[in-house]
């Protein structure tokens, strides 16, 4: 074993591999002649491999284990994958023709009945798949018909969501560790939140798989991640920091791929706690997003006032946003009765200094951005108290006044799923407890609106209302930087962040 891995193991910053080299042991090559691609990242491994749970299906797709009926291309448009095509027969009826040659990794043929069983299970497990609840299914040969309870314009988009990975439900014995899916790789070993090993699927319906094995390892520290790549302990480094990306790019052994994503840094405001709209408005005016993205993060973030990329139809440049303006921020606070009477730089009201609690968890550059926001907001008289958490679960408990959330805003290539989840009164991610009747009405209209131009109009109406209510803000979009050894070909980095591994992944 080389010295880099020994340092990693000693620091307990990566998990001990389950199926290959570990801490200690022989210095003999561990690969045994196999082609193995090793991937590391700060969130490279999840808690469960059950794709139907929460957002965990992303990992099954990334690992090349799971596939969906449709997938998103680089323009975030749905394309057939396990399905051949879809047709909207009536507003509530969709007819989906399945590919006839697909098999699961256990050799079982993917039939319409097995697809139905998988989608029904998803509806039972995942609240975000509520649109599938009460749906009626029929199977005729390789044609699947879905009749939804209400019109649902984004059905094909939602079938791109990794929660809709098609499983052999009857054939899977351990959903958390070894789901039986259709992808080019099969789960070999899994250690929750630490390490995952996948081996090639010899029965893959899509053709020969080039590498024998893939490993994903969680490496919590950016510098350790870069060190592992430079020390040849991993072949691909996800989530590089701006500083380490520069270092890696200067080394001719590696390629750094920079991909603009639909993943935003969303600023939640807890309306149950941060009740004064003037304070929320001042925060929106007081954050210099462009400086954060261009200077502080060295281009690793693109500033935005919208929830959606400007390159999509929904990133409306005409939104009347509360863009960075120190004077307007100070004016909003002064008009609401806040003043710095003791000269300490923090405004007070009724003798109480204005302190806002900001929750943050370890994900990409959340912590870096929070620190810079703290410094910026101090300039307008707001004291920000940062409270760190390991994971984002504190949002559900409401333990914050403001907080950053790293999230894909077009997880299905359409805004509806995101807007429903974060803004609807019953939304599963409405952690700010936002409620507005006009927004609720627009959200209820979106699933019934099939005309693209009218969908854009509704989405922008929703965004403007949220801005007017000072209920939520968006700091900018993450630009994913991935370091890849030049020994590796075919590793994907995409705007959706779902797709990494295909049968064409290879290593010299």
Image: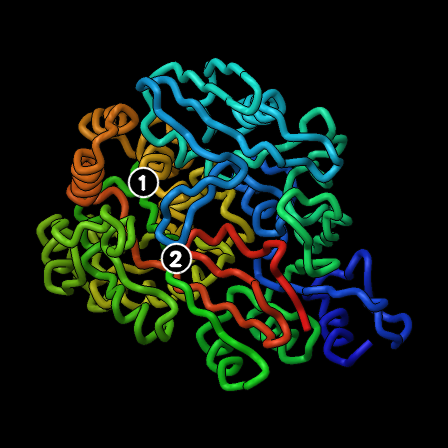
Q: Residue at x 44, y 74 (%)?
A: 242
Asked if one can make out residue 359 in the rendered structure from this viewpoint, the answer is no
Image coordinates for residue 63, horizontal then vertical, percent: 62, 51
Q: Position of residue 465 (x, y in %)?
A: 17, 38
Q: Label 2 crowding class (10 Å Cα cut-off): few <14, some 14-19, many 20+?
A: many
Q: Between 88 and 501, which is closer to the camera in this rendering?
A: 88
Q: Can you give x and y, in whole percent of width and height, for residue 453 in the image?
A: 17, 38
Describe the element under mark 2 as helix, strand or loop.
strand
Q: Is residue 166 above or below residue 66?
A: above
Q: Vertical placement of 199 versus 146: above or below? A: below
In front of the other: 155 or 435: 155
Which residue is at a point 49% across and 54% down the rendered structure image? 361
* Front residue of 361 and 71: 71
Residue 480 in picture, x, y percent from top left: 44, 64
The circle drawn on residue 261 is: 2
**Label 1: which secondary element:** loop
Q: How many marks?
A: 2
Kindly indicate whether the residue at mark 2 contacts the one at mark 1 (C-beta within 8 angstroms): no
Quadrant occupied by the N terminus: bottom right
């Amino acid at each position: 074993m080389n010295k880099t891995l020994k340092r990693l193991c000693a620091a307990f910053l990566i998990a001990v591999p389950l199926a290959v080299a570990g801490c200690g042991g022989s210095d003999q090559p561990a690969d045994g002649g196999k082609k193995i691609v090793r991937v590391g990242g700060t969130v490279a491994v999840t808690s469960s491999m059950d794709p139907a749970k929460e957002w965990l299906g992303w990992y099954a797709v990334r690992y090349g284990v799971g596939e969906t009926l449709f997938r998103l291309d680089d323009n975030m448009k749905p394309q057939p994958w396990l399905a051949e095509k879809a047709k909207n027969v009536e507003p509530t009826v969709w007819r989906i023709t399945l590919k006839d040659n697909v098999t699961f990794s256990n050799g079982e043929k993917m039939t319409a009945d097995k697809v139905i069983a998988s989608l029904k299970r998803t509806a039972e497990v995942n609240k975000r798949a509520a649109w599938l609840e009460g749906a009626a299914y029929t199977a005729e040969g390789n044609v699947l018909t879905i009749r939804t309870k209400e019109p649902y314009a984004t059905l094909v988009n939602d079938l791109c969501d990794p929660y809709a990975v098609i499983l052999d439900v009857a054939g899977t014995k351990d959903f958390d560790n070894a789901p039986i899916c259709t992808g080019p790789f099969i789960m070999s070993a899994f250690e929750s939140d630490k390490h995952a090993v996948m081996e090639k699927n010899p029965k893959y319906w899509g053709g020969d798989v080039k590498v024998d094995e893939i490993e994903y390892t969680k490496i919590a520290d950016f510098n350790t991640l870069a060190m592992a790549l430079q020390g040849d302990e991993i072949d691909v480094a996800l989530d590089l920091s701006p500083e380490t990306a520069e270092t890696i790019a200067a080394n001719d052994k590696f390629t750094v791929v920079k991909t603009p994503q639909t993943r935003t840094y969303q600023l939640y405001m807890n309306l149950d706690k941060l009740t004064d709209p003037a304070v929320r408005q001042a925060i929106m005016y007081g954050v210099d997003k462009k400086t954060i993205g261009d200077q502080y993060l060295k281009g690793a973030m693109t500033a935005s006032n919208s929830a959606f990329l400007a390159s999509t139809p929904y990133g409306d440049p005409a939104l009347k946003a509360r863009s960075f303006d120190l004077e307007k921020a100070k004016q909003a606070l002064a008009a609401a009765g806040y003043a710095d009477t003791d000269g300490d730089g923090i405004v007070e009201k009724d003798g109480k200094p204005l302190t806002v609690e900001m929750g943050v968890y370890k994900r990409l550059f959340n912590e870096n951005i929070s620190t810079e926001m703290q410094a910026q907001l101090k300039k307008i008289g707001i004291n920000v108290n940062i409270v760190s958490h390991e994971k984002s679960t504190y949002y559900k408990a409401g333990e914050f006044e403001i907080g950053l959330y790293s999230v894909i805003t077009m997880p299905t290539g359409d805004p509806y799923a995101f807007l429903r989840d974060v803004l609807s009164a019953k939304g599963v991610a409405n952690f700010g407890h936002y409620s507005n009747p006009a927004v609720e009405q627009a959200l209820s209209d979106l699933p019934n609106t099939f005309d693209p131009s009218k969908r854009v109009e509704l989405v922008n109406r929703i965004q403007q209302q949220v801005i007017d209510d000072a209920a939520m803000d968006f700091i900018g979009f993450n630009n994913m930087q991935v370091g890849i050894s030049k020994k590796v070909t075919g590793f994907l980095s995409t705007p959706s962040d779902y797709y990494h591994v295909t049968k064409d992944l290879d290593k010299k």
